[in-house]
Image: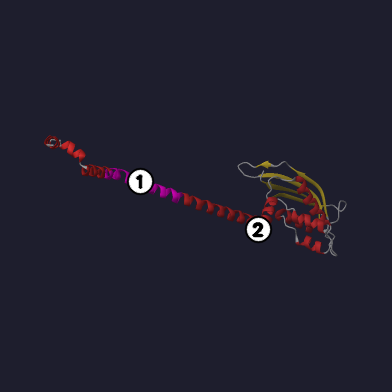
């Protein structure tokens, strides 16, 4: 028994430390504290990034919803604009067309000339005889973003109808005389409607040459006229 006590008393300090649980507990606490100092900031950083990602995802969803609403609103405004602007856009396309439609333009001029011939009154024998229409090929003007075609118009008429026809070429508008003729039944509604719906393209009068007709060729006071105009288009 004495020998056993003697052996135990000779245990080294290192062995005693290993057998002491308090030391191990302290080391464990210190180790955990050290690991906590390393891991905790990383955990907090990860948590912050996670929250930022969630916020961004939430914003993206909100942006997508707003984008859908804005798209729907834009489409609604486009529909409203097209409905409101449709008559003006149609008019613009006719006044400044992409290309000159020679067949349509010839019909407009011929039909307008025929209507002037019909505008007789008690004090005026209306006269207009279209004899020639000649169109040149449309050409792009140098350093310009539009094209031009020249139209030569030859006809015989009286002075009043000449003024009315020139006004039509300059403005593309139907004269008050034609409107009155329509009301008086001198002009067919279908013809008037065609002239109303099919507009003259932009034009510029280059020259007007008018010479009095002889009594043999026509009534006194009538004129032989040749007009040259330029018609403009986008191409």
Q: Is 30 situated left or right of 44 in this image?
A: left
Q: Residue at x 27, y 45 (%)?
A: 33
Is residue 202 at all visible to an observer of this figure? Answer: no
According to the picture, the residue beneath numbered tag 2 turns out to be 84
Per the image, is 33 magenta?
yes
What residue appears at the point 78 percent right and 59 percent down from the top-left corner? 160
Magenta span includes 128:
no
For the residues labelled 1 and 2, the Cα–Cα distance comes to 61 Å
Q: Which mark is residue 43?
A: 1
Is residue 107 shown to the viewer in this render?
Answer: yes
Q: Residue furthest right?
A: 216
Numbered disc in front, either 1 or 2: 1
Region in magenta: 32-56
Spot the residue most to the front: 1
Q: Which mark is residue 71?
A: none
Residue 93 vertical placement versus 183 (above, below) = above
User: At which x and y percent is residue 205?
Assistant: 70, 50
Instruction: Please indicate whether residue 143 sits to the left or right of residue 102 in the image.
Output: left
Q: Position of residue 50 (x, y in %)?
A: 41, 47
- Is 94 displayed left or right of 20 in the figure? right
Q: Nearer the viewer, residue 81 or 130?
A: 81
Residue 214, x across and y down, in percent: 85, 52
Query: Mark 2 or mark 1, which is nearer the start of the sequence?
Result: 1
What kind of secondary structure does the magenta stretch mostly adopt? Answer: helix
Q: Label 1: how many residues lie within 10 Å, few (<14), some (14-19) or many (20+)?
A: few
Give the image quarter of residue 6. Answer: top left
**Residue lying at 22% horizontally and 43% vertically, measured from the top left:** 21
Query: CB of mark 1 within 8 Å of CB of mark 2?
Result: no
| Local secondary structure at mark 1 | helix
């Amino acid at each position: 028994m004495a020998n056993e006590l003697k052996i135990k008393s000779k245990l080294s300090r290192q062995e005693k430390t290993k057998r002491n649980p308090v030391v191990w507990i302290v080391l464990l606490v210190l180790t955990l504290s050290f690991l906590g100092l390393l891991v905790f900031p990383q955990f907090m950083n990860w948590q912050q990034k996670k929250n930022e990602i969630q916020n961004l995802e939430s914003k993206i969803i909100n942006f997508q919803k707003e984008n859908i609403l804005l798209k729907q609103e834009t489409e609604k405004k486009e529909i409203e604009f097209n409905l409101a602007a449709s008559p003006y856009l149609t008019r613009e396309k006719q006044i400044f067309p992409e290309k000159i439609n020679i067949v349509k333009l010839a019909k407009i001029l011929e039909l307008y000339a025929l209507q002037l011939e019909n505008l007789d009154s008690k004090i005026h024998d209306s006269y207009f005889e279209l004899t020639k229409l000649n169109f040149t090929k449309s050409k792009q003007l140098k350093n310009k973003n539009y094209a031009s075609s020249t139209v030569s118009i030859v006809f015989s008429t009286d002075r009043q109808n000449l003024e009315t026809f020139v006004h039509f070429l300059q403005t593309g508008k139907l004269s008050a005389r034609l409107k009155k003729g329509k009301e008086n039944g001198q002009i067919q509604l279908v013809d008037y409607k065609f002239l109303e719906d099919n507009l003259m393209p932009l034009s510029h009068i280059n020259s007007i040459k008018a010479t009095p007709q002889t009594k043999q060729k026509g009534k006194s006071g009538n004129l032989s006229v040749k007009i040259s105009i330029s018609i403009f288009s986008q191409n």
